[in-house]
Image (cartoon, rainbow, N blue to C red):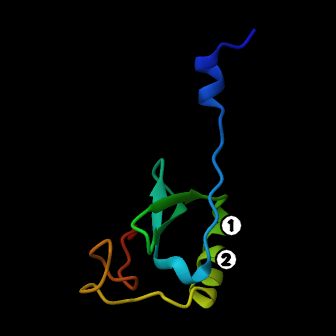
């Protein structure tokens, strides 16, 4: 039988937000692999989304094209980083 502690490990969470609520999107590494995106929302929350390697860049471009409130200014940045900075240099 499965205990309550084990059930908590497998619980998944679902969050929904509008494109207009996305303030920043940055490419990130997860477990040393370039497979994640970090999204910063207008309400102060941030999300680390992990994808298969081939899909991350496609989704990143789609978000850049769809999210209307994105900024590339480090001055107004939630993360203090410009979107155009490459933090994944090999």
Q: Examine the rendered structure and indicate whether residue 2 appears above or below residue 25.
A: above
Secondary structure at numbered mark 2: helix
Q: In whole angstroms, how far apart are the C-alphas of marks 2 and 1?
A: 8 Å
Q: Is residue 80 left or right of residue 60?
A: left
**Circle number at residue 83:** none
Residue 16 image offset from top left, x and y in percent: 64, 64
Q: Would you name the residue on which mark 2 appears? A: 58
Name the foreground residue: 41 vs 32: 41
Name the foreground residue: 8 vs 52: 8
Task: Tell me which residue sits at (50%, 60%) in the image.
Answer: 47
Task: Tell me which residue sits at (44%, 75%) in the image.
Answer: 42
Residue 22 image offset from top left, x and y in percent: 51, 77
Which quarter shows the N terminus?
Answer: top right
Tag 2 near tag 1, CB within 8 Å: yes
- The quadrant holding residue 72 is bottom left
Callout count = 2
Residue 38 image offset from top left, x and y in percent: 47, 65
Q: Examine the rendered structure and indicate whether residue 14 appears above or below residue 10.
A: below
- The quadrant holding residue 79 is bottom left
Residue furthest to the top in view is 1
**Circle number at residue 54:** 1
Q: Is residue 36 left or right of residue 44?
A: right
Residue furthest to the right in view is 1
Rate crowding at label 1 as few (under 14), some (14 to 19) or many (20 or more) other CA atoms within 10 Å.
Answer: few
Residue furthest to the left in view is 75
Residue 14 image offset from top left, x and y in percent: 66, 53
Name the foreground residue: 31 vs 90: 31
Task: Tell me which residue sits at (65%, 35%) in the image.
Answer: 11
Rate crowding at label 2 as few (under 14), some (14 to 19) or many (20 or more) other CA atoms within 10 Å.
Answer: few
């Amino acid at each position: 039988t499965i205990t309550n502690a084990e059930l908590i490990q497998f619980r998944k969470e679902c969050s929904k937000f509008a494109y207009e609520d996305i303030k920043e999107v940055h490419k990130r590494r997860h477990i040393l692999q370039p497979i994640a995106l970090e999204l910063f929302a207008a309400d102060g929350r941030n999300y680390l989304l992990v994808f298969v390697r081939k899909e991350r860049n496609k989704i990143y471009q789609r978000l850049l094209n769809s999210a209307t409130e994105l900024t590339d200014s480090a001055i107004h940045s939630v993360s203090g980083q410009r979107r155009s900075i490459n933090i994944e240099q090999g």
